[in-house]
Image (cartoon, rainbow, N blue to C red):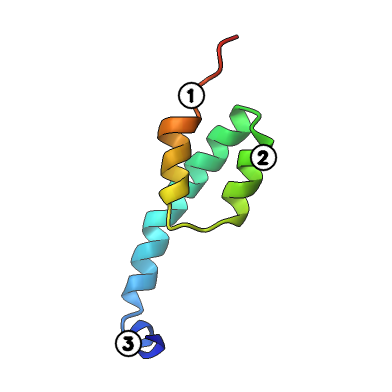
């Protein structure tokens, strides 16, 4: 498996290009919504943007004021 990744480093680049914008958007939304726990989890846990997408589209809906 390691040899496969070394021979196909474009996979890592593609995963980074996919993950970084979603992580940035999710962290921005968590900070704006004052969701400290979500911010910390999103910052530490790397799930190839799966958790970030759940947060953005499901959990980050603004709370009623």
Instruction: Identify the image quadrant of the N terminus.
Output: bottom left
| Cα separation between marks 1 and 3 | 42 Å
Point out residue 15 in the picture as x, y percentages from the top left corner.
Answer: 38, 63
Q: Residue furthest right?
A: 36
Q: Residues within 10 Å of mark 2 (few under 14, many from 20)?
A: few
Q: Residues within 10 Å of mark 1 (few under 14, many from 20)?
A: few
Instruction: Identify the image quadrant of the C terminus.
Output: top right
> Depth-wise, is mark 1 or mark 3 nearer the camera?
1
Nearest the camera: 49 or 9? 49
Nearest the camera: 60 or 9? 60
Point out residue 28 in the picture as x, y percentages from the top left corner.
Answer: 56, 37
Contact, CB < 8 Å: mark 3 with mark 2?
A: no
Write the residue at 41% across / 87% down. 2
| Cα separation between marks 3 and 2 | 38 Å
Disc with the residue nearer the chain's start (3 vs 2): 3
Q: Name the residue tied to disc 3.
A: 7
Q: In the rendered view, does 57 fall on the left or right side of 24?
A: left
Q: Residue furthest bottom?
A: 3
Write the residue at 56% across / 17% down. 63
| Cα separation between marks 2 and 1 | 15 Å
Q: Name the residue tied to disc 2.
A: 37
Q: Residues within 10 Å of mark 3 (few under 14, many from 20)?
A: few
How many marks do you count on the picture? 3
Residue 41, disc = none
Q: Is residue 11 above or below residue 6?
A: above
Question: Element under label 1?
Answer: loop
Write the residue at 64% across / 32% down. 35
Q: Name the residue tied to disc 1.
A: 61
Question: Element under label 2?
Answer: helix
Question: Element under label 3?
Answer: helix
Q: Is residue 5 above or below residue 58?
A: below
């Amino acid at each position: 498996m390691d040899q496969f990744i070394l021979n196909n480093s474009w996979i890592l680049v593609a995963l980074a290009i996919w993950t970084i914008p979603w992580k940035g958007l999710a962290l921005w939304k968590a900070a704006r919504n004052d969701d400290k726990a979500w911010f910390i989890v999103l910052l530490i846990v790397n799930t190839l943007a799966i958790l970030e997408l759940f947060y953005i589209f499901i959990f980050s809906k603004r709370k009623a004021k």
